[in-house]
Image (spheres, grey):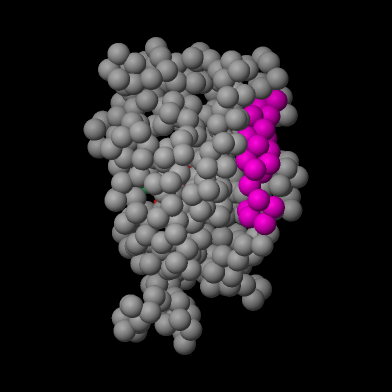
């Protein structure tokens, strides 16, 4: 057990993150039009900065329109979207927190209705759009027909790499200090990583090197425009949880990929899991993905983030203290309690707790 705890600052490149608690990216499906943020995004993300998170990360933010899960996803494919996000990043920074953006492309899980409107695919005729996939024939049966799905051509792949690069440039102009590449949960980049969904026979399919090529190209493109003093994260699914099924993506490949991404200048691997196939055999529960983060950590010289089933300050603190991860990302608990970071300071930081609360709220410290 080292001296590092949940409230030890984390320095990545020249960026000092005030504590080890991050708001995990969470889609809000709350844009009215064209991927533009609304008041909902500003208040939702701003509240969690007030609530003591060291990093506040946006939801999956589409790098191009066809990369949206729904018509209501946040986007960063044009300058108007970047400008509209600026007041939010400024507010987050004013609270001493670090604004981060998750850059995403939904691949063949795009063009759907919002979860609370059924989550089912929308065809182009109904106002949906063509979706990209590494290999349509391999799309796992989520019980849905996807006639609008198209196998990505080499040109499509290059377009997406370019879209990521340009989205990163825009994110920087919007004031974000961390860019996270979303390569998890069965979305486009994960679809290329996993042999379950990638049955290509070109340079982007087959061997480990070929299946990882797309995510390596995207990471390199983001790194190219992201300043040297600021970190890049990559979120991966540590495993498909299909160990008893077909050849799939697993934690050994994740550890290997982490080392490759470190060499390309990625600074932290955010280790989630699953989301690719309906037969996934995942258990859930407290800390269920932490062992994956630990294994990925052994893979290379790179920081790791743990996420999933982390709900209690002491639990989060133990993950960091025991060196199981460098950062803890909290999702649903931050929906239940936007002030999870303040609660953690109250419980864990003793006499230093008041200084970790916004001055306006300090009379609330116990
Ligand atoms: C998510 N999750 C998610 N993950 C991601 O990488 N990008 C995203 O946009 C979303 N969107 C999203 C929306 C909502 C409402 C939930 C609940 C979850 C997954 C999330 O970031 C996290 O990894 C999981 O929820 C597991 O962590 P918790 O919730 O157990 O702390």
Report the residue at 45% width, 44% height from top. 82
Q: Is residue 332 above or below residue 315?
A: above
Percent position of residue 307, x then y: 50, 53
Q: Is residue 196 visible?
A: no
Q: Is residue 220 magenta?
A: yes
Report the residue at 34% width, 16% height from top. 124
Q: Quadrant of the N terminus?
A: bottom right
Q: Is residue 249 left or right of residue 102?
A: right
Q: Is residue 4 visible?
A: yes
Q: Quadrant of the C terminus?
A: bottom left
User: In front: 190, or 289?
Assistant: 190
Report the residue at 65% width, 37% height from top. 221
User: In front: 15, or 20?
Assistant: 15
Percent position of residue 237, x then y: 55, 40
Q: Is residue 299 magenta?
A: no
User: In front: 38, or 126?
Assistant: 38
Report the residue at 59% width, 45% height from top. 234
Q: How many discs appear? A: 0
User: In front: 281, or 21?
Assistant: 21
Q: Is residue 117 above or below residue 230?
A: above
Q: Is residue 20 above or below residue 190?
A: below
Which SS does the magenta portion mostly show?
A: helix
Which of the 4 image quarters holds residue 36? Answer: top left
Q: Residue lying farthest bottom?
A: 351
Percent position of residue 282, x then y: 47, 41
Percent position of residue 245, x then y: 55, 27
Q: Is residue 281 left or right of residue 257?
A: left
Range drawn in magenta:
210-231
């Amino acid at each position: 057990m080292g001296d590092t705890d949940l409230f030890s600052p984390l320095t990545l490149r020249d960026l000092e993150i005030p504590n080890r608690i991050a708001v995990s990216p969470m889609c809000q499906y709350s844009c009215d039009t064209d991927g533009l943020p609304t008041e909902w995004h500003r208040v939702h993300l701003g509240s969690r900065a007030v609530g003591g998170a060291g990093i506040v990360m946006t939801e999956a933010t589409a790098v191009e329109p066809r990369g949206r899960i729904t018509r209501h996803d946040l986007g960063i494919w044009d300058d108007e979207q970047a400008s509209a996000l600026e007041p939010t990043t400024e507010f987050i920074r004013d609270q001493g927190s670090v604004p981060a953006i998750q850059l995403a492309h939904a691949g063949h899980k795009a063009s759907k209705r919002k979860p609370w409107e059924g989550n089912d695919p929308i065809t182009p005729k109904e106002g949906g759009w063509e979706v990209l996939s590494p290999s349509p024939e391999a799309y796992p049966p989520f019980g849905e027909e996807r006639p609008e799905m198209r196998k990505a051509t080499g040109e499509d792949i290059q377009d997406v790499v370019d879209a990521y690069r340009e989205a990163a440039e825009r994110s920087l102009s919007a004031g974000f200090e961390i860019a996270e590449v979303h390569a998890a949960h069965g979305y486009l980049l994960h679809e290329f990583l996993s042999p379950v969904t990638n049955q290509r026979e070109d340079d982007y399919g087959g061997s480990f090197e070929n299946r990882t090529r797309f995510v390596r190209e995207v990471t390199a493109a983001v790194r190219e425009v992201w300043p040297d003093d600021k970190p890049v994260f990559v979120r991966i699914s540590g495993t498909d949880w299909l160990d008893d099924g077909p050849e799939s993506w697993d934690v050994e490949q994740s550890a290997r990929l982490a080392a490759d991404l470190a060499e390309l200048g990625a600074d932290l691997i955010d280790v989630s899991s699953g989301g690719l196939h309906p037969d996934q055999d995942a258990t859930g529960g407290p800390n269920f993905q932490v062992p994956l983060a630990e294994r990925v950590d052994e893979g290379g010289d790179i920081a790791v983030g743990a996420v999933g089933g982390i709900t209690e300050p002491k639990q989060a603190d133990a993950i960091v203290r025991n060196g199981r991860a460098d950062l803890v990302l909290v999702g649903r608990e931050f929906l239940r309690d936007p002030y999870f970071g303040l609660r953690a300071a109250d419980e864990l930081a003793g006499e230093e707790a008041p200084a970790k609360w916004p001055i306006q709220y300090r009379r609330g410290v116990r």
